[in-house]
Each structure stands twice: as structure tokens, then as C-alpha cells.
Image: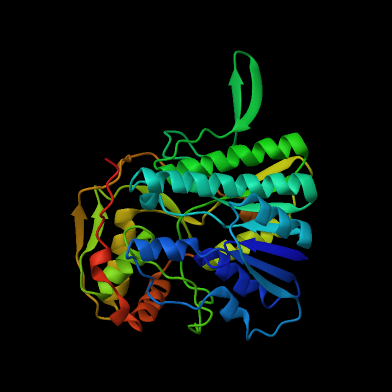
Amino acid sequence: MKILILGADGYLGWSMAANLFSSSHDLFLVDNYSKRKHMKSLKRYPLLETPLVKKRIQNIKRKGVTKFYQLDCSKYVDIHKIIKNIMPDVVIHFAELPSAPFSMINTTNSWETLRNNLQSTFNIIHSLKDLSPKTHLIKLGTMGEYGTPNIDIEEGWLNIKHKKRSDRFLYPRQGSSLYHTSKIMDTDLIWFYTRMYGLSCTDLMQGPVYGLYPNKKLDDDVAPLFTYDDIFGTVLNRFIIQAIMNQPLTVYGTGNQIRGYINILDSIECIKIAMKNKPKRGELKIYNQFTEQFSVLELAELVRKSLKKININVNIKKVKNPRVEKENHYYNAKHSNLKKLGLKANKLNEKMIIQIANYCMKYKSNIKINTIMPKVKWK
């Protein structure tokens, strides 16, 4: 197939591309390096400065075509032209600003998150509608769209009975940041274009992702961006970095906030499963893409216990929560559909945490410890 990966420089985008390098698919990679630019402007740095995509793919020998285009998906002319030239079988859409704290810094960053994410999604689906409506669009959503409702979270849809009548609706969504709100609007846009113009779309509601791809020998040239700071880092990365720097693992508030987590290997596998199960024209498939649930406190305790085995001893410290969110809540999200299609989960364990820690310790001198504690407050 001809596969167009948008946001190919990102943690997920590059990991997805690296996995598909071993296939015979023709790969077309797109990025405008906006995340790198925003990180630089905010003085946030990845663990390792990885080469730009074009340089990374220069020495890759593979059967299929691999091309990289540096362009901005939020510019309609650019994305329309690339889709017209390629006419892809699949578009994998990672081209969004993926940070809740970034979206809450100030009005400029808030609007940039909304503008970039909505404009990019609109441009992609509008171009597909006009040029290639049979293309399968796979968009990465987030479990954060659902929030923390006091009922079970279904997989994208909810059957409603009201006054002796029934219908099926998108599951109610209530994001806890402007980033998550932008993803809710993405879903609404995609559903509109799917039902109005007969597109074939899959929306993957992913929980926080962790791990390294590939997870064995990781050359610097193929390593994805590994972020750990307060704005772009994920909680597990942050805990591991704090531990190897002999800092307490800082838990926001009570630490009882529960989320669904997924290994990067499983995230890639889920997308490949989605590619094999294309929706019918006019159908939007939604999967909840995570494999297990943890509270933040449980995650911190798992990191503490795991790294004790390699003589890293740290404490857990609760700090004031900079976010506005429920800290004690019900959380039961369904996630059976990808399992039914063949997903076999790589569960988070001590071995995986130690592996990530050993990788991070190779670049310990690069760590900017002053970028870890939260600087952005919701109010």
C-alpha cells in the first residue's frame, strides 16, 4: 500500500515509520518540526537530540519507496497537493500538538493548539473528500476526550434509550484541557465528514503511551524523541528520570487519578490492526487503545519497586496538583475490540521499567532536572 504518515518526526510517528521500514509498503513521511520548535522556544529538551527525519532515512535500504516532505498540515494547499500527488491507500494522522500543559500556558498557546489541530484535521479530511474518498484515514485520538465520567466508558459509542425511543450517539466527551478539547472537536469533524461524504475512518482513543521502539538495541539514529519535562513529557518518563537523578517521584494531588496505559509496541500493533480492518464507506470505527489501567500512585510505586532492583532507591512525594481534574473518581473504560482483532498486550512490568531506565542512564548528562517540576497551572 501507499501509506502517508503525518507527524512522522514525533514519538509515535517515527516509531510507526520505523516499524514499517521492514515492510514493502511505499512510505511517505510528513512533518514540519513544529514540536521541536515549540520545545526550543520553551527551553524544554528531549533526552537525546535525534537527527531530522530526512537524515534518518538516508541510509535505510528497503524494498518500498520512502520519501519525506517537510510541510505544514495546517496549510490547506500543502496537504491537498501531497494527497493529490500520492493518492494514498492509508493516511495515519499524528500531525497534532500533543500536550495538555502546552495548551494551558496562555492564550497564544491555547489558540495555537486549537488552530493547528483543528485546521490540520479539517484540511486532511476535506482533501480526502475531494480527491481520494476511498482512502482509509486513521487518526490518533486520546482517552482524555472522555474525561472521568461516573459511568463505564464504552468504545466510542453509546446506545441511548429516552422516552421509549433509542438511538446510537458518540459517547459524551468532556476533556480536562484545551488539548483534549481539540481532540474532541477532531472526532466531531471526522464523524461529520464520514457520514456526509462516505469517508472510511478509524479513530483510536489512546491512553498514555510508554516504552522504546525498537525495544532491544536502540541506535541513536532510529531512536524516537524521548521527552520527560513538565510540558511535553509523560508521567512514566518523568518518574524514571526523577529516579535516576535521585529525585523523589512527584505525584500530583492524591495520585488516585486513573488512566489507561499502553506500550509503544502495542500502539504500533493497534494501528497495523486498524489498517487490516478498514471501515466501510460512511463508517467511523472507534477503538479504545490501551491495555491496562493504573492510578498515578500505583505507577509511581511500580517504578520505585522496579528500580530498587538496580540499586536506585527513591521516595514518592505528593505535590499540589497544577491541573483542574478529579483526583478521586470512578474509572472503568472498555477496551475489548482490539483484543478481539488479535492484539496481544505487552503489560508494564519491572523488566520494561528497568530497560527504559538503563537507556536513560546512557544520556544522564543531558538531563535538565529543572524542567521536570510543573510550571503550568490550569488556574
Image coordinates of residue 85 in percent, x first then y, are 77, 61
Q: In which image quadrant can residue 3 be found?
A: bottom right
The quarter of the picture where the C terminus appears is: top left
The N terminus - image quarter: bottom right
In the shown orientation, is residue 291 left or right of residue 305? right
Front residue of this view, candidates 194 and 241: 194
User: Count the marks: how many?
Assistant: 0
Across and down, in percent, residue 44 comes to 34, 65
Q: From what the image shows, is residue 246 above or below residue 123?
A: below
Residue 75 visible (yes or no): yes
Q: Residue furthest front?
A: 77
Q: Residue at x 62, y 79 (%)?
A: 57
- Please indicate whether residue 295 sits to the left or right of residue 271 in the image: left
Q: Position of residue 90 (x, y in %)?
A: 73, 58
Residue 31 as seen in the image, left or right of residue 356: right
Q: Quadrant of residue 230?
A: bottom left
Image point 74% across, 75% down: which residue? Answer: 65
Identify the coloring.
rainbow
The answer to whether residue 154 of the structure is visible from this angle is no
In the rendered image, residue 337, in percent from the top left (x then y), is placed at: 63, 50
Seen at 48% across and 83% down, the residue is 220
In the rendered view, tell whether residue 95 sits above or below residue 50.
Answer: above
**218 relative to 91 in the view: left or right:** left
Q: Residue furthest top?
A: 163
Viewer-side residue, 45 vs 296: 45
